[in-house]
Image (tube, rainbow, N blue to C red):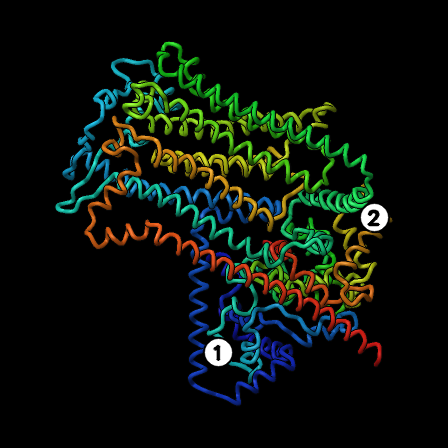
Amino acid sequence: MGGSSSLLPRDALGEYQVGGCRVGGDRGIGNAGSRVWGSSRIVGPRECGESRAVAGAEPLPSGHPGLTALSPQELTFLNKQEILLAYKRFSELLPKEQRENARTVRVPASQILTLPELRANPFRHRICHVFSTSVDEDDSMSFEDFLDMLSVFSDTATSDVKSHYAFRIFDFDDDGTLDGKDLEKVVNCLTGQGEAQLSSTEMEQLIQNILEESDIDKDGTINISEFQHVISRCPDFVSSFKIVL
Amino acid sequence: MSELGAGAELPGWGADSRRRSGKDGRDSRQADIKYPSGWNEWKRASSKSWKKSLKGIKGLSSYLKLWRHDIHSIEGKFGTGIKAYFSFLRFLVQLNFLLFILMFSFVTLPTVISNYGIFNSSSAEIFPDDTEPYCTVYTPTGNKGLVYFYTYLKDLLTGTGFLEVTVLFYGYYTVDAAWLSVLRYNIPLAYLLVTFAYLGLSLLWIIKRSVEGFKQNLVHAEDQFQSYCNKVFAGWDFCITDLNAARLKHHSLLYELQADLEEERLKQKIADRTMKEKLRIYTLRIFLNIIVIAVLLGCFYSIYRATVFSQENSSDVNSVNFQANLLVQYLPSIVITLVNFIAPQIFSFLIRFEDYSPAYEIRLTLMRCVFVRLANIGVLLFSLWSQIHCATDRCKACGYNYELYPCWESAVGQEMYKLLIFDFMIIIAMTLFLDFPRKLLVTYCSWKPVQWCGLQEFGISDNVLEIIYGQTICWIGTFFSPLLPAIATIKYFVIFYIKKVSLIHTRKPASRPIRASSSNFFFLVVLLIGLILALVPLGVSIAHIPSSKACGPFRSFDTSWAIVPHTVLGFPTGLRKVIYGIASEAFAVPFFIVVCLIMFYLIALAGAHKRVVEQLREQLVMSFGQNVIRTETT
């Protein structure tokens, strides 16, 4: 415990207590064109509104009581140990000389994808893409983005948050709806790139069935509310949409 | 350290988050400024600190949880379905440990202490007048003099010899009451009450656990209307980190989707079936079901014969022929294990011809396997009781076959003890002598047929059935052998590690994994069936079969249950009247009616809720429709 806390100073943890509630409305502004959902990023739990209010007040001196009263648990869905572990894992991705300032450096997508937790995941490129806030569209991740990701995939994140991000991950062309092409890509990701694949008639029938089940307004695509409605009746979703670090 | 931290960068962060907080953040801030109230401030602060400390305690207690890390890593590697099995195993360890504590502290400890004469105690020596003296003769065949060392081993495995009159078995508990100065601790009563308590406690705990899953099943009933969505949108288990497991998952998902599409086509085909085809299939099914029943009856009969043979021959064979005697002693266990192994194979072979849909096929095979496993124990007990009960005149005097079983409860306890030990040995042996060589063979031998066979699958349902079978034995046996939960605790503890090793190293994950949401519930339902099955033999032996007159706590009573009326008679008149009142028809009939009324009310309520849900769903569809119209018109 002592070892890991020395990696991320305790005071710095205090900052995530504020910064951790990264509901950033304007965060996606750099690449707003492609980020349909960027304007409503919800990562932290319920009390976010409150803490944002505190954080957004006058620039705070470091010893402000309002800061010390907050804990990291209230701002992301992670607890202290998890944040420290995340920090440790994140800095291990960096070359040695950059580890000192791990909180400001971005890790390229190719490095992130080497994480064992993502290695086996067929949606790893999408995950990287969705959580990256890089201006250059190179899907690189900062520590904040990394925490965002872990927070969404944590045990305690609510089903709403999870389904919201799941929608964005499945939305391959970033157009805000899941259409036939997106669904086909999702199914192909699920069944893998092996020799066995669904035949085109099977695929067609499958997509037809999925749309029949979930497309309530019958416009041929699934929008976010339809998706969340489907997910809310899906008992396995919350337990499987989870990454354990 | 602090230099690195807050001081330097905090304002930056503050500004950052302020920028991020956006519009709604500003609104809530304004609301806060408008109504600054000390009380609200305090309330918020205190609730926050309360939540914080609660979280701290939760975090700490999670460290104390058994196998937290192991289960976590298993979940990370193999997904939630397999994790469900391991947390189920952990639940059984906890349950058995609790049962052990209960039995030990209220029955074993007082008896042992009073046997060592620390308290004044009295043995139950008062016999009912009509008891024949020969019923009370009980001379356990303890080892006298010099014996071969392997006799001890045999005794350890079969629970006879030096183990027979120890705290392990019913026969030891002959103390009637322990006196703690003036307080009288009634051990027979405690024995019976603890038996009820452990059954009740198990029931409550299982129900408490399954309510969670039941609620989920009820609310999110996996309706057929969105099975494809479930499979596609919640199909991938994001926990999986093992590349091999991921490949398997890809395969299983592909297989599942194909199977579902196929099933849809099959349904279409079934709907188009002609009368003649229907007739053919139904006759075939009836025929195959008759075969299944015949197989079952054959299994039951062989268990019956084995038990009778073993009971008749085990007592008169001396320790001269060690192996033969051990084999005879273990014959029922061996036959049961064989049946448990062979019958499922036959069922899964037969089901192919019955032409059911794939999903139904799996469920039906599973139900048949559950039935075989649990019915086997029932048959074993039935055959034991057919031995214990006898119709000759001399038997009538004692009410049981006293010649063969001077202390029949201990004999049943020994049988359960043997079953538990044998089950344990089989599980260890399967991993050590079957899976492990197979793994070596597959890894180091490139011969085609070996590679084609591959590794054994880690089938969850088989494994769950295995441990539920063990748990049912434990529940039945605890009355006859009070320390059985302790053995079961150790057993499950070891099994956890064995299964973990077997999962990670010697077996491959099943190609058709079971879903976490349905499996949690399914495990508990089967466990509940096991518990209810355990209640029947226990109820019969407590209330119906005369208790041994030569050993045990109930030797001065006709049956074990007789202690309850006896105790009630000793109560003050008022209390006695109340108890009689509760037990009378005058109370029971109205009570039954009230319970029925409550049930009907709840059923009606559930129906109403269902309708509300449907209405809401319709409303949702309607509002979507209106949205579309609105966007189209604008």
- As displayed, is residue B130 above or below residue B100? above
Q: Is residue A124 visible?
A: no
Residue marked by disc 2: A202
Q: Residue at position x 56%, y 48% from top?
A: B520
Q: Quadrant of residue A140?
A: bottom right
Q: Is residue A3 left or right of residue B74?
A: left
Q: Is residue B402 visible?
A: yes
Residue furthest toward the top? B320
Mark seen at residue A31: none
Tell me the chain of label 2: A
Residue marked by disc 1: A66
Sequence order check, earlier mark of 2 and 1: 1
Binning the other alpha carbons within 10 Å of mark 1 as few (below 14), some (14 to 19) or many (20 upward) gives some
Q: Residue at position x 47%, y 31% from top?
A: B378
Q: Is residue A137 left or right of residue B544?
A: right
Tell me the chain of label 1: A
Q: Quadrant of residue B249?
A: top right
Which of these two is toward me, A73 or B551?
A: B551
Q: Residue at position x 29%, y 43% from top?
A: B105
Q: Where in the figure is residue B545, as x and y percent of width and height?
A: 34, 31
Q: Is residue A92 left or right of residue A219?
A: left
Q: Where in the figure is residue B144, as x and y percent of width and height?
A: 25, 16
Task: Label 1: state its secondary structure.
Answer: helix
Q: How many labels, in total?
A: 2
Task: Label 2: state its secondary structure.
Answer: helix
